[in-house]
Image (cartoon, rainbow, N blue to C red):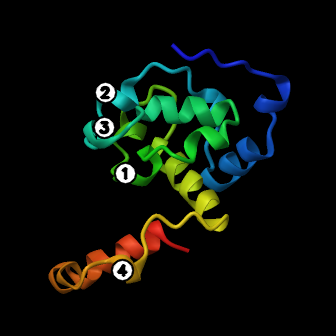
Amino acid sequence: MMRITITPADLNSEFVRQVEELSGQNLAACYQCGKCSAGCPAVDEMDILPNQLIRLVQLGREEGLADKNTAWLCATCLSCAARCPRGVSVSKIAEAVRAIALRKGDDRIGVTQLPKEVLDSVPQQGLVSAMRKLTT
Protein backbone atom coordinates (compact mmCIF):
# COMPACT_ATOMS: atom_id res chain seq x y z
CA MET A 1 0.00 0.00 0.00
CA MET A 2 1.33 3.41 -0.97
CA ARG A 3 1.75 5.92 1.84
CA ILE A 4 0.91 9.54 1.01
CA THR A 5 2.41 12.36 3.02
CA ILE A 6 0.18 15.41 3.24
CA THR A 7 1.57 18.88 3.80
CA PRO A 8 -0.35 22.11 4.45
CA ALA A 9 0.83 23.32 1.03
CA ASP A 10 -1.00 20.39 -0.61
CA LEU A 11 -4.30 21.32 0.98
CA ASN A 12 -4.02 24.95 -0.07
CA SER A 13 -2.59 24.44 -3.53
CA GLU A 14 -3.39 26.48 -6.61
CA PHE A 15 -4.66 23.30 -8.25
CA VAL A 16 -7.30 22.82 -5.53
CA ARG A 17 -8.40 26.44 -5.88
CA GLN A 18 -8.63 26.09 -9.68
CA VAL A 19 -10.73 22.94 -9.48
CA GLU A 20 -13.10 24.51 -6.96
CA GLU A 21 -13.44 27.63 -9.08
CA LEU A 22 -14.01 25.79 -12.35
CA SER A 23 -16.34 23.16 -10.90
CA GLY A 24 -18.26 25.32 -8.45
CA GLN A 25 -17.90 22.49 -5.93
CA ASN A 26 -16.74 22.62 -2.33
CA LEU A 27 -14.13 19.86 -2.18
CA ALA A 28 -14.09 19.91 1.62
CA ALA A 29 -17.73 18.81 1.62
CA CYS A 30 -16.76 15.30 0.46
CA TYR A 31 -16.11 12.96 3.38
CA GLN A 32 -15.35 9.90 1.24
CA CYS A 33 -18.52 7.86 1.85
CA GLY A 34 -18.10 6.19 -1.57
CA LYS A 35 -21.72 6.51 -2.73
CA CYS A 36 -20.54 8.24 -5.91
CA SER A 37 -18.36 5.25 -6.75
CA ALA A 38 -21.07 2.73 -5.87
CA GLY A 39 -23.51 4.28 -8.34
CA CYS A 40 -21.18 5.23 -11.18
CA PRO A 41 -22.07 3.46 -14.45
CA ALA A 42 -18.54 3.92 -15.84
CA VAL A 43 -16.61 2.71 -12.80
CA ASP A 44 -15.68 -0.65 -14.36
CA GLU A 45 -13.54 1.13 -16.96
CA MET A 46 -11.88 3.58 -14.53
CA ASP A 47 -8.47 2.97 -13.01
CA ILE A 48 -9.34 4.78 -9.77
CA LEU A 49 -12.77 5.20 -8.20
CA PRO A 50 -14.60 8.53 -8.43
CA ASN A 51 -14.21 9.14 -4.67
CA GLN A 52 -10.47 8.50 -5.06
CA LEU A 53 -10.39 11.15 -7.80
CA ILE A 54 -11.92 13.63 -5.37
CA ARG A 55 -9.43 12.64 -2.68
CA LEU A 56 -6.45 13.21 -4.97
CA VAL A 57 -7.87 16.61 -5.89
CA GLN A 58 -8.52 17.44 -2.23
CA LEU A 59 -4.87 16.69 -1.55
CA GLY A 60 -3.70 18.81 -4.47
CA ARG A 61 -2.13 15.81 -6.20
CA GLU A 62 -2.36 17.06 -9.77
CA GLU A 63 0.63 14.95 -10.80
CA GLY A 64 -1.12 11.86 -9.44
CA LEU A 65 -4.00 12.42 -11.84
CA ALA A 66 -1.89 12.83 -14.97
CA ASP A 67 -1.83 9.14 -15.86
CA LYS A 68 -5.30 8.26 -14.52
CA ASN A 69 -8.25 7.84 -16.87
CA THR A 70 -11.11 8.42 -14.42
CA ALA A 71 -11.62 12.13 -15.18
CA TRP A 72 -11.57 11.36 -18.90
CA LEU A 73 -14.04 8.46 -18.69
CA CYS A 74 -16.60 10.26 -16.54
CA ALA A 75 -19.91 10.05 -18.41
CA THR A 76 -21.17 13.27 -16.76
CA CYS A 77 -24.45 11.50 -15.99
CA LEU A 78 -24.63 13.22 -12.57
CA SER A 79 -25.48 9.97 -10.74
CA CYS A 80 -22.76 10.93 -8.29
CA ALA A 81 -24.42 14.22 -7.40
CA ALA A 82 -27.82 12.55 -7.05
CA ARG A 83 -26.42 9.96 -4.61
CA CYS A 84 -24.08 12.23 -2.65
CA PRO A 85 -25.40 13.12 0.81
CA ARG A 86 -23.46 16.40 0.58
CA GLY A 87 -24.42 17.23 -3.02
CA VAL A 88 -20.88 17.01 -4.40
CA SER A 89 -20.75 16.38 -8.15
CA VAL A 90 -17.80 14.26 -9.25
CA SER A 91 -18.86 14.99 -12.84
CA LYS A 92 -18.21 18.70 -12.40
CA ILE A 93 -14.91 18.03 -10.64
CA ALA A 94 -13.83 15.63 -13.42
CA GLU A 95 -14.72 18.26 -16.00
CA ALA A 96 -12.58 20.82 -14.16
CA VAL A 97 -9.65 18.36 -13.98
CA ARG A 98 -9.98 17.73 -17.74
CA ALA A 99 -10.10 21.46 -18.46
CA ILE A 100 -6.95 22.12 -16.44
CA ALA A 101 -5.12 19.24 -18.18
CA LEU A 102 -6.25 20.40 -21.62
CA ARG A 103 -5.11 23.94 -20.91
CA LYS A 104 -1.66 22.50 -20.24
CA GLY A 105 -1.70 20.72 -23.60
CA ASP A 106 -2.58 17.20 -22.43
CA ASP A 107 -4.69 16.16 -25.43
CA ARG A 108 -6.06 12.64 -25.03
CA ILE A 109 -6.78 12.03 -28.69
CA GLY A 110 -5.28 13.24 -31.94
CA VAL A 111 -7.60 13.60 -34.91
CA THR A 112 -4.81 12.70 -37.30
CA GLN A 113 -4.17 9.48 -35.36
CA LEU A 114 -7.69 8.13 -35.86
CA PRO A 115 -7.99 5.44 -38.56
CA LYS A 116 -10.13 6.37 -41.57
CA GLU A 117 -12.49 3.47 -40.77
CA VAL A 118 -13.26 5.03 -37.39
CA LEU A 119 -13.82 8.46 -38.88
CA ASP A 120 -16.17 6.97 -41.46
CA SER A 121 -18.18 4.90 -38.97
CA VAL A 122 -18.52 7.27 -35.98
CA PRO A 123 -21.50 9.64 -36.07
CA GLN A 124 -20.37 13.21 -36.64
CA GLN A 125 -22.03 14.38 -33.42
CA GLY A 126 -20.11 11.76 -31.44
CA LEU A 127 -16.84 12.75 -33.07
CA VAL A 128 -17.39 16.46 -32.36
CA SER A 129 -18.37 15.67 -28.77
CA ALA A 130 -15.23 13.57 -28.24
CA MET A 131 -13.03 16.29 -29.75
CA ARG A 132 -14.53 18.90 -27.43
CA LYS A 133 -14.00 16.69 -24.40
CA LEU A 134 -10.57 15.28 -25.20
CA THR A 135 -8.65 17.98 -27.08
CA THR A 136 -7.74 21.64 -26.81
SS category of the residue bearing label 3: helix
Q: Where residue 127 sits: x, y (%)?
A: 31, 78
For the C terminus, the image quarter is bottom right
SS category of the residue bearing label 2: helix
**26 left or right of 17?**
left
Along the line of sight, the residue nearer the viewer: 45 or 39: 45
Residue occupying image coordinates x 36% and y 30%:
37
Q: Which one is closest to the eye, mark 2 or mark 1?
A: 1
The CA distance from mark 4 to mark 1 is 16 Å
Question: Given the image, on which type of amino acid does mark 1 rest?
Answer: Leu
Among numbered discs 2 and 1, the one appearing first in the sequence: 2
Along the line of sight, the residue nearer the viewer: 79 or 63: 63
Among numbered discs 3 and 2, the one appearing first in the sequence: 2
**28 left or right of 93?**
right
The CA distance from mark 4 to mark 2 is 30 Å
Q: Which residue is mark 1?
A: 73
Among numbered discs 3 and 1, the one appearing first in the sequence: 3
Q: Which of the labelled discs sits on residue 128, or is there none? A: 4
How crowded pointer 2 is (Cα within 10 Å; few <14, some 14-19, many 20+) is rated as: some
**66 left or right of 110?**
right
How crowded pointer 3 is (Cα within 10 Å; few <14, some 14-19, many 20+) is rated as: some
Q: Which residue is mark 2?
A: 38
Residue occupying image coordinates x 60% and y 38%:
64
The tally of labels here is 4
Q: Which residue is mark 3?
A: 43
